[in-house]
Structures are given as structure tokens and as C-alpha cells.
Amino acid sequence: MSRIFVPSKGPDDWRPLLADPEKHWETKHSARTLAHCWEDAAGFPPEVLKVLSRNPILATAEPLLIFPEWKVPLPGGSRSSQNDIWLLAKTAAGLVSIAVEGKVEEPFGPNVGEWKHEASTGKDKRLAWLTDVLSLSAPIPDPIRYQLLHRAASAVMEAERFGAQHAAMLVHSFSKNNSGFGDFAAFAGLFSLSAVPDQLLSTSMPNGLPLHLAWIRGDMRFLNA
């Protein structure tokens, strides 16, 4: 991936970055909805800022750089973790790396059990790395959604790469029924955290890096954008 970037002129500039620009760019689907929501805000959408403000440090967060479809290479295999949005923000206490996963009614993809069904050396290596970087107990339960693991790991990995003092993984959901929230709650449970929509959950990695998780309900008016 080139490390040269150009400013966005609007939501349509997000479309070519998708894995499938035709299939994934539909009204009432996450990619298009997320693009319109974040472009309209020109920074943190109000509902995201409201949740971040529950933490005294993150309350001062100001986006510095926002990248749609940001790819983070991971050990074990050739496929990167493609974040719907990754952003670097500054706070009064330093930088924060934030990975955002947008959802409407789309599932989180295969769970760990399904993903490792066809075992390989690369998959074994990646799962071991994810377990280590997120400081989780092995083995990771099969029902946990693999996407949530590597999305959170992306936030941690980029925090380390950019020298950030905090990492966060946010699910920005535009589902009227909070579809997929049970999967997010199960993932949060790996850190002994009890998930509630629009609440910020916080834990710490062994190296002292704070990791924040949140399920944030988006503004439904962007579903028809």
C-alpha cells in the first residue's frame, strides 16, 4: 500500500478504497453510511465524541488524521486487517490510535472456530500473535468473532507504531436492532468487561497501554444518504 495520501473531497472518494466498490457501496449498508456520517461531521460524529467524553483523557480527543479502509499488516498470512476507518487523534495526555468498524445489519464474519477450520501454519501463527498482542488467555473460545480480534489488534499495533498513549476499537453501528451486539459483548467479556451500548469500556495491556472498547449507536439519518 502506498504511503502517499490525498485529501477526501467527499463520501464518494471512499468508494474506490473498498475491497468491492460495487457490492459494498449500497444505501443502508455500512460502508456508504459510515462515509456519509464521518464526512458530515468533518471529525468525530457527535455520538462518538459523546462516548469518548466519558473518559477524562479521551474527552479532549481531537482527530489529526482520518484514513478510510486503512490496512494494517498482521503476522501469519498475507491478508491485512482492513479497518473501515483508522484515525490518529491527539489528547491532552498524548496520542490515541482508534480503529472503527462500521456496521448496519452485516455480520462480523466467521467466528474463531469457523476461521481456523482449515488449519494452516499461518493461521496458527496469526492466532497466537493475536492472543499475545491482546494479552488474552489461550485458547480463544471458538464463538468469538475473528474480525473483532484483529480489529482491536490493529488499534494496539498502530498505537505502538505511532507512539500513541492510548488505543481504542469502536464499533459504529447503524443497526436499529443493535444487530451483532451480542458478539461484541462476548468479545468484551474476554477482558472481563460488561458491554453496554454507548458506554466506553477500558482495560490495559501488560505494557501499560490502555485499550478502550465501545459499541456506539450511529445517527440513523445517514442510512438513506
Image (tube, rainbow, N blue to C red):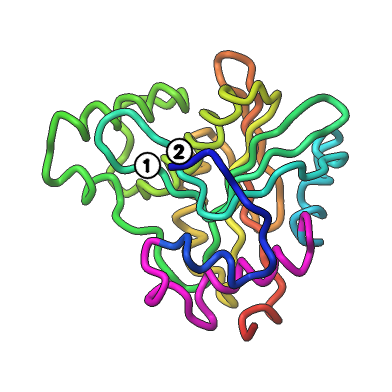
Instruction: Write down the quadrant of residue 1 in the picture.
Output: top left
* Residue 102 horizontal side relative to residue 198, left or right: left
From the viewer's side, name the closer residue of 177 and 85. 85
Can the viewer see residue 71 in this picture?
yes
Instruction: Please say if 194 is above or below 24.
Output: above
Q: Residue furthest bottom?
A: 224
Magenta-drawn stretch contains 39? yes
Q: Which residue sits at x=61%, y=80%?
A: 223
Q: Which residue is mark 2?
A: 72
Amino acid type for the residue under numbered disc 1: Ser
What is the spatial separation of the Cα atoms under label 2 and label 1, in whole angstroms?
Answer: 5 Å
Instruction: Write down the quadrant of residue 209 in the picture.
Output: top right
Mark 2 or mark 1, earlier in chain: 2
Instruction: Please say if 14 is above or below 210.
Output: below
Q: Which residues are magenta?
A: 19-44
Q: Secondary structure at mark 1?
A: loop
Instruction: Please say if 80 is above or below 68.
Output: above
* Residue 155 horizontal side relative to residue 183, left or right: right
Residue 105 rendering spot, x and y as whole percentages: 47, 73
- The reply to whether dot 2 and dot 1 touch (C-beta < 8 Å) is yes
Q: Which residue sits at x=37%, y=33%?
A: 74
Q: Which residue sits at x=62%, y=86%?
A: 224
Q: Secondary structure at mark 2?
A: strand
Mark 2 surroundings: few (<14), some (14-19) or many (≥20) residues within 10 A: some
Callout count: 2
* Residue 178 horizontal side relative to residue 124, left or right: right
Q: Which residue is mark 1?
A: 80
Magenta-drawn stretch contains 8? no
Amino acid type for the residue under numbered disc 2: Val
Instruction: Please say if 140 is above or below 128.
Output: below
